[in-house]
Image: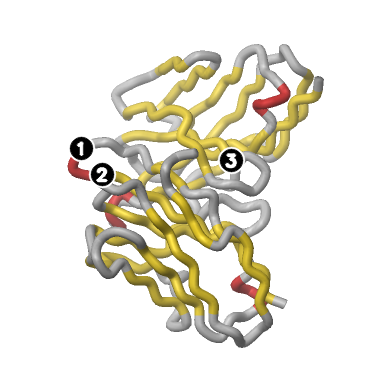
Amino acid sequence: DTGVSQDPRHKITKRGQNVTFRCDPISEHNRLYWYRQTLGQGPEFLTYFQNEAQLEKSRLLSDRFSAERPKGSFSTLEIQRTEQGDSAMYLCASIHRDRGTDTQYFGPGTRLTVL
Amino acid sequence: SQQGEEDPQALSIQEGENATMNCSYKTSINNLQWYRQNSGRGLVHLILIRSNEREKHSGRLRVTLDTSKKSSSLLITASRAADTASYFCATHFSNSGYALNFGKGTSLLVTP
């Protein structure tokens, strides 16, 4: 257990439905990242937050994706109008960047299956 | 695009043997990290090696880094069945707030 939790662990939904995932980072960590991992691939960066500010989104984050970190603590990732291509593992990670460490702590992931 | 390329993609060994996996990357780095992932779960950080280091040890792990060849290797000595997992190398994006750029990973199977 790294101290980062994600909920739910598994989500099955039908195409066109909206889904929302939650990530609770390690409490004092000021930076939070979202990644997506498809089968047989390494994780790919989606977006990151410094406290409550979303500072970057990758080109993988289409308009149907939105992420928030309202109080600089937990974060949510919402996918609207899901497509089968959204089926993947969604991972979040956190780090206390000001401590000069580069080690990210990952949650267990949310596995999304879009039927 | 993904930065690193691990080699081999899959590796099968018996308990007690050593496992070596390699990673190549494309751009200059400040450090390179190795992570382990067990059967579709989250990633666990194993070891970080800085660009001015050539070798680093942690328990049964040995990591080397050759910045001239833009490559790194991870050696697991005296492997155990519990080492069965996917192993990923990762470097940082030059921007994107130190987000990690992962390779595709090596899937290691250690049989008793």
| Colouring convention used in this rendered image of the protein | secondary structure
Q: Position of residue B107 (x, y in %)?
A: 68, 38
Q: Is residue A26 visible?
A: yes
Nearest the eye: A65 or B89: A65
On the image, the x and y values in percent for residue A5 come to 46, 51
Is residue B1 in sight in this rendering?
no
Q: State the quadrant of the C terminus of chain A.
A: bottom right
A49, above or below B78, in the image:
below
| Circles 3 and 1: CB atoms closer than 8 Å | no
Q: To which residue does mark 2 refer?
A: A96
The residue depicted at 43 percent of the width and 34 percent of the height is B33
C-alpha span from label 3 to label 1: 25 Å
Q: Disc 2 residue type?
A: His
Separation of residues labelled 3 and 2 (CA atoms): 22 Å
Q: Which chain's residue wears label 1?
A: A
Say which residue appears at 48% left-offset and 49% top-offset: A107
Q: Nearer the viewer, residue B19 or A68?
A: A68
Give the alpha-carbon distance from disc 2 to disc 1, as whole Å. 6 Å
Hey, which quadrant is residue A83 in on the image?
bottom right
Residue identified by numbered label 1 = A99
Q: Residue at x 68, y 81 (%)?
A: A14
Name the residue carrying label 3: B37
Query: Helix or strand or loop: what does disc 3 sit on?
Result: strand
Q: Is residue A94 left or right of residue B86?
A: left
Q: Is residue A6 above or below residue B47?
A: below
Could you tell me if the residues under marks 2 and 1 are in contact, i.e. CB atoms within 8 Å?
A: yes
